[in-house]
Image (spheres, helix red, strand yellow):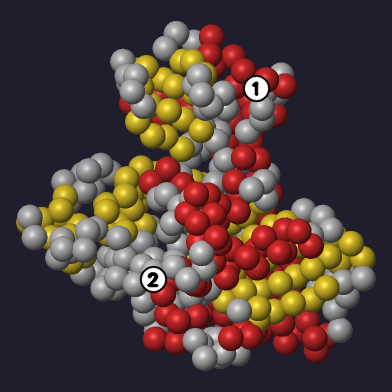
Amino acid sequence: MAPPTDDDPDRRRVFEFAGEQPGPTLVITAGIHGNEPAGLHAIGRVHDRLIADGVEVRGTIVGFAGNRQALARGVRYVERDLNRGWEVERIDRLLADRRGHAAEDLEQSELALVLIDEEHRARGPLLLVDLHTTSAASQPFVCMADTLRNRPLAFAMGLPVVLGLEEVIDGSMLGWLVDRGHSGIAVEGGQHDAAEAVEVHEAVVWVALHAAGCIVGPPHVMLAQAQRRLRAAAADLPRVLEIRHRHVVGPFDAFVMASGFASFVPVRRGQVLAHDRTGPIHCSEDALLLMPRYQPQGEDGFFLAREVRGAWLTLSAWLRSVGADRLLPLIPGVRRDIEAREQLVVDRHWPWRLTVDLMHLFGYRRVRPGESGAVYSRRRPDARDPSSR
């Protein structure tokens, strides 16, 4: 299936099955960046197989093309990154005046409208799988906002799960939809032009169909093959990692990544990772490198990540399930924000790393500076109204 182009207005929706039985709505998006068409090809393969096999579907399965103008040109974006700027206020402005000022404004308003429409039509839970690829060689992995609602879908993939991107990247489409109360993950399937990336994304879609409960009857024959494919791709990589650092690239930085890097390569503190107009860029700590940038566009130079132990995840799930976060304001230096009771303010005298680790346990992963300390908040599915406790 060829990627939809700018002169193909009816191809925003590239995949749809609606079952007679009510059930979940599984939304699959691909090509949010125009130089990442692998997900669209994978969607096409699954679509054709579902039709050929006469598979009975529960609920709705729908796939959308992302940045059609950028896809037509084979570039990451035309004027700005479509996977940024999904803050509620900006979306409201775009939907009020869809003319916008950039090529991506129209793309974003159309995507927001179709996603809101699926939300209104849903006869059960809504789940999003957003398919991406990377400019450097990479084994595939899953990105998710660390809510309990997202974990089953993310871990069903059998791929490494990366936490914390929402702390360092604001305004992603996935974050916007999760904040509306839904489940969602993003999957980085490999290098942009690698045939393996299409195969990985195809496997991801098959696993997602079954994990979401969209397939009626026994598992489709493709499920076991897909699971084997993803397990093999994961190899001996850590099961869960968290982002520790993001190197931001400005438009005039003249950023150049040092050659030979790939995702999951171990790097050492002090190692030269890249250069820009100020000179060499050194690694800030021992870590695993993720998504080094080998493309002209994009504000993400590279990421550093470290493994998260399974016991930490188990403890965090228990603490959240019993509502233990209500005890946090009893700790000296921690209090609820006066204007936003679902947020917590931690005094400046707390050690930064200790604060971050503590807040992560309770699902507070988004942080911004406040007048008297750091302000932490959670994605909506893990957040509850404190006044109702």
Against 27, residue 64 (above or below) is: below
The quadrant of the rendering that contains the N terminus is: bottom right
Name the kind of residue labelled 1 in the image.
Answer: Pro
Q: Residue at x 62, y 40 (%)?
A: 380
Q: Residue at x 62, y 74 (%)?
A: 64
For numbered disc 1, what is the local secondary structure? helix
Q: Which residue is mark 1?
A: 386
Q: Quadrant of residue 198?
A: bottom right
Q: Is residue 214 visible?
A: no
Q: Is residue 67 visible?
A: yes
Q: Residue at x 78, y 81 (%)?
A: 50
The quadrant of the rendering that contains the C terminus is: top right
In the rendered image, residue 379, in percent from the top left (x then y), is placed at: 57, 40
Callouts 2 and 1 close, C-beta under 8 Å:
no
Choose mark 2 or mark 1, whichever is in front.
2
Q: Earlier along the polypeptide chain: callout 2 or callout 1?
A: 2
- For label 2, count other residues whose C-alpha is less than 10 Å away and answer few (under 14), some (14-19) or many (20+): few
Of the pair 138 and 371, the residue shown nearer to us:
371
Q: Is residue 191 left or right of residue 233?
A: left
Q: Is residue 342 left or right of residue 242?
A: right
In the rendered image, residue 172, in percent from the top left (x then y), is placed at: 48, 56
In the rendered image, residue 227, in percent from the top left (x then y), is placed at: 67, 66
Q: Which residue is mark 2?
A: 102
Of the pair 295 and 160, the residue shown nearer to us:
295
Q: Is residue 316 left or right of residue 94?
A: right
